Image (tube, grey):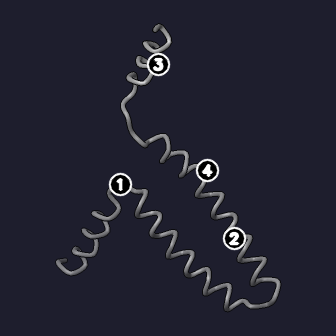
Amino acid sequence: MSTMTTLHDLAQEGGLGTTGVRDWILNNVIPLLLLVVALLLLWLGGGKGDNAGVMRRLGGVIVALAIIGLAVTTDAGKNIGTWIAGLFTG
């Protein structure tokens, strides 16, 4: 019974959330994916001299990174909307 009480107390010390998982993904998975994409772009297109194909793929990667940036930033969507509205309202 002592072990169950200890586990219950440990589980209740911090609040439930995904902050640790989010930080781990941002610190580990995203840079690793960027490295893999960069190596694939260099290996697939750079060795064949297909520079235009590499640049097309790079454009897609930049768009994907922008979407990931919007997804992991808390107020980015609101701030971008305010900026765009400010362009028209002055």
Tally the marks.
4
Mark 1 or mark 3, which has the lower sequence index? 3
Mark 3 or mark 4, which has the lower sequence index? 3
Q: Which residue is mark 3?
A: 7
> Gap between marks 2 and 1, in whole Å?
27 Å
> Gap between marks 3 and 4, in whole Å?
29 Å
Mark 2 or mark 3, which has the lower sequence index? 3
Identify the mark at residue 74; answer none if there is no mark: 1
Q: Position of residue 36 (x, y in %)?
A: 69, 65
Q: Which residue is mark 4?
A: 28
> Gap between marks 1 and 4, in whole Å?
19 Å
Identify the mark at residue 38; answer none if there is no mark: 2
The type of residue carrying mark 3 is: Leu
The type of residue carrying mark 2 is: Ala
Seen in the image, is 41 located left or right of residue 19?
A: right
- Between disc 1 and disc 3, the foreground one is 3
Q: Quadrant of the C terminus?
A: bottom left
Label 4 secondary element: helix
Mark 1 or mark 4, which has the lower sequence index? 4
Q: Residue at x 43, y 57 (%)?
A: 72
Q: Position of residue 56 (x, y in %)?
A: 60, 87
> Gap between marks 1 and 3, in whole Å?
32 Å
- Between disc 3 and disc 4, the foreground one is 3
